Amino acid sequence: MKTSIVFLLCISVFPGFSQGRVVGEDETGFAECNVFFPGQVPPEGFTEPFHVKICQQYNREPRFATLYSTKDKIPLYSAFKYTKPAQNVEENWLVEPQIDDPENDLHEMVHEANIVGTVANLGANQALTSDYVGSGYERGLLNPSLLNEEDFQMATYTLTNAVPLSPSLSKSWHRDIGRVVEQALVPHCSKKDHLYLLAGAIPSSVRVKGKVSVPETLWLAACCDAPEGWSLGLVKKTNDENSLADLMVGELEKQLLAGVHLFKGSCGGDNQNQKKIETILKAVSQIRSGEQVGTSDDEEAKDSGLVRKVAGIIATPFIKLLELLIYVFVELVKFVFYFLWLVIKQVVGTVLDGVYSLWNGVVSYLKTISMVLISIPYDVGRVIVNIFLGFLQIVQDVASLTYRILRIPVGFVLHLAAFPYHSICAIPSVLKDMATGIGGTFSLVIDATATILHGFYYLAAHIVKRFVPKGSSDD
């Protein structure tokens, strides 16, 4: 997050940053980059889920449009307009964070080194500089920088506009495309701003480091959407860097995906100016054979004479010295800006770290104070409750002790006072019980004696009856 904040601050300090916006699925075509297509209608037929639309911007202005394949990790085409030829500038290669991490808050193209560790899955869906290092391939631009000027040229140096090309093929492609556009296409379109260009690549199964597809074919489609308009296609096979075949746009579309239509309107129909097309094809043929388009065979036109050669020889050292001085001055300016950039980056980083630490300290202090303030009423209430409960316990203990102290003497006195009463009152009852007991004892003795005598009598009578003969009574 800190890196993102520093990067956004740097954008505000150095506004010349490229911005590549991934176009949402709910937006029409390429959004604000639809201006790079005739009738503002992009090509049809590129509908795979791994096709990503990018509106390439610089200084908050659209510069060209790119359809990128996250499967092959190369652009399928870049749509642009010719501005005018310009001198080469320093290459500042950029990547698009949202291709790999759609949830990232960086909505602009950035230098790869500035976002390492801050973008999830960096390089999962797009090529990186590391994929080209030591591979033998260069980052070949579909939208060539030499056909653009100023901000348009700066915007071309993005890896979403580059395909792997051998150094010789890259040089041949840019040379041929530059000459065809400048010498054959632009002069035959009545309105230069109505010349629409599509530069594309057909992926192959060959991969750089098993990741980035090496194109098997490079192609260019041009449309002059103006009165007496025309359209034309060019194809270069990557296995033959000297090849450059011209064909109609309809024939080019057949070599691409099924159902592809590159241009709408007059550019895609049969109502085209055949005379201009023949003139353009003748110019392309001259370029292919190495001739200079639009010049005669006159020796005077080819050679300016001995005087010009001598003047050139004399002026060359001064020109080289001037170039050296300009180069030294430019390098000094770059060094100063780079130094200022490092200083600003360090200062901003230090300030942000200080602000972050101060903020954490303030938050921790406020949190601690709040907890203490919240706990004070609770602690006071708990102390009051404990004091009250302690007071009640003391009162209970005093009452219990008093009760026990008072209870022991009163019972003892009552029992002691009642003893004589109970003792004297018990004498008659005791005497009565003794008399009753003695009388009962005598009665029991008498009853026992009578019972014994009655038993003896019964026994004697029974013996007499048993043993005395009955006949004695008859005699």
Image (spheres, helix red, strand yellow):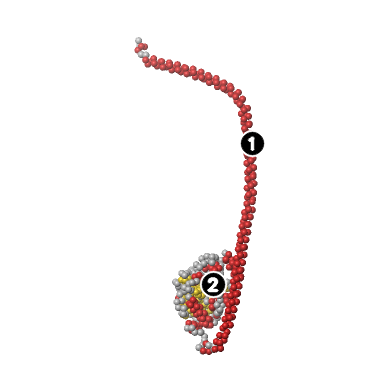
Quarter holding the N terminus? bottom right
Instruction: Characterize the local packing of mark 2: few (<14), some (14-19) or many (20 or more) Cα atoms within 10 angstroms.
Output: many
Query: What secondary structure is marked by label 1?
Result: helix
Against 310, is 447 above or below?
A: above
- In this view, the residue in front, 39 or 69, is 69
Residue kind at label 2, given as amino acid type: Trp
- What's the amino acid at mark 1? Thr
Per the image, the residue denoted by label 1 is: 402
Q: Dot 1: few (<14), some (14–19), or many (≥20) neighbours within 10 Å?
A: few
Q: Is residue 92 above or below residue 403?
A: below
Is label 2 in a helix, a strand or a loop? loop
Give the mark nearer the N terminus: 1 vs 2.
2
On the question of residue 249 being in view, the answer is no
**Residue 4 image position (x, y, % from top left):** 57, 66
Q: Residue 316 lies in what quarter of the image?
A: bottom right
Of the numbered discs in the image, which one, if any, rests on residue 93? 2
Q: Where residue 145 sits: x, y (%)?
A: 54, 76
Compared with residue 350, is residue 78 higher up or lower down, i.e. above or below? below
Tell me which residue sits at (63%, 27%) in the image: 417
Q: Position of residue 459 (x, y in %)?
A: 41, 17
Quick check: 333 left or right of 443?
A: right
Q: Which quarter of the rendering shows the C terminus?
A: top left
Q: Is residue 295 visible?
A: yes
